[in-house]
Amino acid sequence: MTMRSFKVLAAGVGIALTVAACGAGGAEQAKQDPSAPLELWTRTTPGGDGEKGMKKLAAAFEAATGQKVEVTAIFDDFETKLSQRAAQKDLPDIVMNDSSQLGTMVSQGIVREVDLASIKGSDQLLEPALAAARAADGKTYGVPYSAQASALLVRKDWLKKVGQTAPANWDQLVALAKAFTTQDPDGNGKADTYGLAVPGSTKRGYASWYFSNFLWAGGGDFIAKQSDGKFKPAMTTPESVAATKWFRDLACRSKVVQPGAATMDTPPTNETFEAGRTGMYVVGPYLMPRFDSSLGKDKYDVVPMPQGPKDATVLAEGGSVYLMAGSKNEAGQNAFAGFAISAEGQKLGMQGEKAFIVQLPVNKSVDVTTVRPDPRWKLYADAYREHGRYAPSIPNWTAVRQSTADTMNALIADCGLDLDAELKKLDQKLGEALSQQGIGAS
Amino acid sequence: MSVHQATRVTGSAPPAARAEPPAGRQRLSRRRSGQWWVPWLFLAPALILFLYFKFIPMAQAIGMSVQDVRPYLGNTWVGGANYAEVLGSDGFRSAAWNTVVLAVGQTAGSMILGFCLALLVEGQTRKLTFIRSAAFLPVVVPLAVTAELWRIMYHPTGDGLINQVIGLVGLGPSGFINDPQTSLASIAVTGIWRGAPYDMMIFLAGLAGIDRGLYEAATVDGASTRQRILHVTLPGLRPVFAILFVLAAVRGFRTFTEVFLLTNGGPNGSTEVVMTLIYKLGLEQSRLGVGSAGAVLLFAATLVLTVCVQLLRRRRSA
């Protein structure tokens, strides 16, 4: 590299920094065009049932209003791709994504505040779902269109084989997991079955996402809200430590978790359940159609989550319609959100054996059993209403989820690690993340 | 500026050639007739593509690295805060170390294996052409497919393919990518498997350029195969080694896909490399400023490495 190339490089860096120092302008409302087609992104597998369901909803909306909607399905690295579009200042008009993404999107300024008065039928929304669409500042930035909670899937034929019933508490869960692991429930003569399927990868925070069902039922918490509205790290409370130890022992002591869990996200974990490698799996209702066709409806039961030391709290989640910033058609955005939560939209979203996008309705006037007589759906609906708990609305939940996933992943991958020391380190990390977000309790 | 330097900068012929009036006059007349832009015209498509897809984004990344990036709320200047955060994040030091270990391991492994393969498949017969093509296959298989295949082969129980193989000699079963002790080495092996055939091809090109007469002379002098490799082949491949070293080191620094797909930096951060850390900080948490700062640091490290290698080469050849 010659002196001249160095000079060129230095000049380039100088120009880039100068431009950056001048700063960019803030947000302005784009020029409105009420007939502009709406670009909609949904986080689901391209070409899969979720996409078909979303297209069905978009077509019904178009038939009702004449408004065009272009549906794009993206599954891998959804948030990354959205960040890239944000950097180009060219966002889709509507994003259908997890409710837990709210904080991150709000702090990025890529979603606009929702005026519930201009969303038709928003007074019919269930309160817990609506609360999950409120950000830390108390304003609403999303319109919930679907809800879900976790329940336990258990291999029915394996239960018969080992002569046990579905577990009602944690002790029974461990006993059954051990039986599934040691008693050759598939009868192939090999020790190749495991009690519980666990997606323990750090990717998208899966390890923490899965563990939250057990942490909350054990009375623990990731972060605890104080009376002044601020948060404190809570992974070193006795309840959290006990729940973490219990969960880790499944992998390290009783060894009832499938091998390789530490590097598995959901797709390979789903495969362990449908391939008859694991006998229990804690998931939302969205996997039932898949397992019905791959494994067979008669092969597994859906039962409520076993009672933990504290209660049977499960992770509640859902999807929200996010109205993105910079849209040329805000009236269209509002109309679509209103249609998605209307009784018609909700029922349409629930229809079909496979291509449905609404798991559990968020509209008070819609009863899940009217569209889905299958009792398993009723079980999920009850779990959501009675035991569901959403992740807290903080500016960046992803950071908290990621840190806890890193620690949980480490604990199940390396059985020699000192659990207390790791959780202390985690609390420190969480404390830093909370202060960075301006919500750390002093 | 000396005459030698002047010729180097202008890219014109050496002084001896310039003494020939016809060539000089021809060039002058070409310049006067305005044909200096012809080479630029040929270069233009590539240059425009490079400018649009490489240099402008690079400049933007440098700009974003000193800002809190919020496209719709307005970016705010934060100076070195993003850099401080990347350098100060508790994972950065171990990620940088893992990156160096992985880069060194993969570079050395790929070069040694590539060199051995090249020696084995060098020659003219038809069979060798087929074997060469077969050996090159890992390079053309998409990395996502490679990673998924290795994940299956690395299955951490006794049923796993590789565990069955090492079980034959009484080893294992190993946890491979699922065990913090062996995860980085397992990823390095995957990288070597993929990188070695690429290095092999470049070595083959280098081997073809070595004067056969030297081998014959060495044989006449009674040199053994080992001595021929040591005193004829290796010195003849010196420039190839330099090129490969730069290419492989840069490739090693930017390792991302295999780590992301196989372990995503886990278990317990044992395979976290700089690129996966940047991805987590910048993109998964939608903090583009922090991610850009990490990318600029990586660019700087790669630049320093490349410049050092160039300077070393120049000193050697001087």
Image (cartoon, coloured by chain):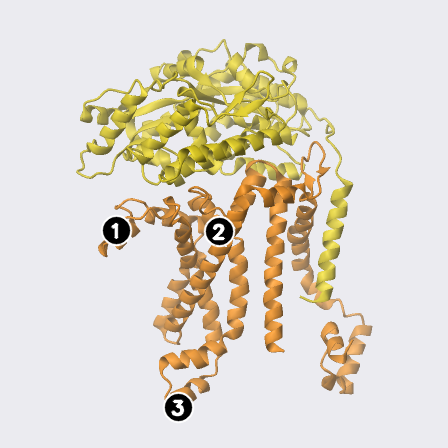
Chain colours: A yellow, B orange
Residue A77 higher or lower than A141, as above or below: below
Q: Give SS at disc 3.
A: loop
- Which of the two labelled residues, at mark 3 and mark 2, occupies the earlier sequence position? 2
Left or right? Give the position of A242 relative to B27.
left
Report the label total: 3
Say which of marks 1 and 2 sits in front. Answer: 2
Q: Residue at x 40, y 16 (%)?
A: A383
Residue B98 is labelled as 2
Nearest the camera: B55 or A100?
A100
Element under label 2?
A: helix
Describe the element under mark 1 as helix, strand or loop.
Answer: helix
Q: Name the residue under label 1.
A: B164
Q: How far apart are marks 3 and 2 (CA)?
A: 47 Å
Picture quarter with the C terminus of chain B: bottom right
Q: Earlier in the sequence, mark 1 or mark 2?
A: 2
Residue A428 appears left or right of A20: left
Q: How crowded is mark 1: few (under 14 residues within 10 Å), some or many (20 or more)?
A: some
Front one among B212 and A370: B212
Q: In this view, does B15 lie to the left or right of B291?
A: right
